[in-house]
Image (spheres, helix red, strand yellow):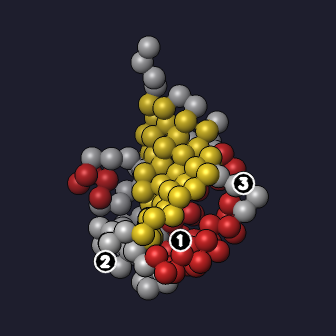
Amino acid sequence: MKVKRNKIFSGTPWEPLAGYARAVQAGDVVYVSGTTGTDPSGKVLSPGDVYAQTTQAIRNIENALKRLGLGLEHVVQTRIYLTQIDRWQEVAKAHAEFFGQIHPATSLVGVARLVDPEMLVEIEATAVY
């Protein structure tokens, strides 16, 4: 049986370059690609500010989910990649502001860098209908 796939694109320059969608719905599950604190053109917002970038990344995830008829309350898992792991509490604060009552399973991992050196945090999410 073939599962119907619905794809959402954000318009950032990396999607066509790397061949991916911002979010893919497969059946009752939505997979949101690694999302950063950027505007639709891919410009990094709030350079140096981990908290602000985390907040923007979550808003970008929320916008993708809304286009599929979902909200953050549908998120069951997040995966967070942080270039400065000693700043994890700033990420945790922003994550808790959005997900504190939802309680998705989550991971927070320190990484050497992201695709743009100004990007400090990247978040993936999985949501279900």
Q: Amino acid at mark 1?
A: Thr
Label 1: how many Cα within 10 Å (few below 14, some 14–19, many 20+): many
Q: Which residue is mark 2?
A: 117
Which is nearer the N-term, disc 3 or disc 1? 1
Q: Amino acid at mark 3?
A: Ile
Residue placed farthest to the bottom in the image? 48
Q: Position of residue 87 (x, y in %)?
A: 51, 81
Quarter that holds the C terminus: top right
Q: Which mark is residue 104?
A: none
Q: Position of residue 68 (x, y in %)?
A: 56, 42
The CA distance from mark 2 to mark 1 is 15 Å
Q: Position of residue 64 (x, y in %)?
A: 52, 51
The CA distance from mark 2 to mark 3 is 31 Å
Label 3: how many Cα within 10 Å (few below 14, some 14–19, many 20+): few
| Label 1 secondary element | helix
Residue at the image position 49 percent from the left and 81 percent from the top: 86
Query: On the image, which quarter does residue 113 sit in?
Result: bottom left
Q: Which mark is residue 54?
A: 1
Q: Which residue is mark 3?
A: 102
- 64 left or right of 33 in image: right
Residue at the image position 35 percent from the left and 60 percent from the top: 12
Residue placed farthest to the right in the image? 101
